[in-house]
Image (cartoon, rainbow, N blue to C red):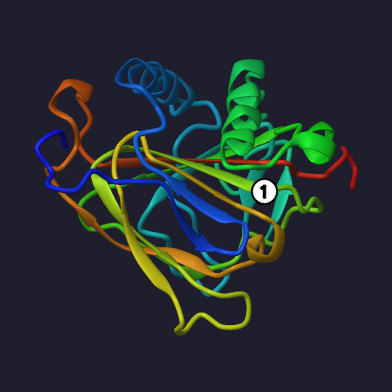
Amino acid sequence: MADELFPRTRSALGPGAVHVPDWLTPEAQLRLLAACREWARPPAGLRLVRTPGGGAMTARQFGLGWHWYPYGYARSAVDGDGAPVKPMPPWLAELGRTAAEAAGYGGAEGDDLAYDLALVNFYDADARMGMHRDSDEKSGAPVVSLSLGDTGVFRFGNTETRAKPYTDVELRSGDLVVFGGASRLAFHGVPRVLPGTAPVGLGLTGRLNITLRVSGLTDGA
């Protein structure tokens, strides 16, 4: 917010984990939101994710490039309508690479930042995400997380346990988080969303989180 007493600044959430506020411009946010609305349509669109125990995640999800289901990946929506997953757009893959480089990843490891997978979660006012690790990929490349819409409280923990120590940070529309290296398998989650906090000009009620990853997967693997 422009009238804040202390402007938000880039900060470390852990070793190899970086929060970059306001990384996406308002124009870039509008473009990404419009694309997400198209991708969320059937086939292989936004769905309710069922857990092995019979419950359901409160955040709804769809994938690009690969379809995630507990706890693996497929090229089709195996726990949804069964349709082939939509491809990962080259411009979104490039956005992931640019974001990772903005967070300090690149150089010698830049050739490994071939983002081929996006998981998009939609949170309404009552949705949340429990503490978990992004461990189903076969690549250790950093995870890129982009936020759109309502502010979400992001809880970033450690690699050993879902419990403390962890850090809570508010992620607003346009914010970037990248975590890799020693923090690649850190537990993290979203304990709550703050309704009504999205930028007025964005036209989104709720929160979208776009996570970009390098799968390390091949067809048939």
Judged left or right of residue 195, residue 104 is right
Q: Is 161 drawn above or below residue 175 in the view shown?
A: below
Circle 1 packing at 10 Å, graded few (<14), some (14-19), many (20+), is many
Q: Is 207 drawn above or below residue 94 in the view shown?
A: below
Give the image quarter of residue 166: bottom left
Residue located beneath label 1 in the image: 142
- Using the image as rendered, state which of residue 5 and residue 194 is in the foreground: 5
Q: Amino acid at mark 1?
A: Pro
Q: Residue at x 81, y 53 (%)?
A: 138
Judged left or right of residue 4, residue 179 is right
Quadrant placement of the N terminus? top left
Any part of residue 11 in sight: yes
Residue 181, image x, y percentages: 71, 58
Any part of residue 82 in sight: no
- Using the image as rendered, state which of residue 181 and residue 155 is in the foreground: 181
Residue 163, image x, y percentages: 46, 84
Q: Secondary structure at mark 1?
A: loop
Residue 133, image x, y percentages: 60, 66
Give the image quarter of residue 170: bottom left
Judged left or right of residue 119, residue 174 is left
Q: Residue at x 87, y 37 (%)?
A: 219
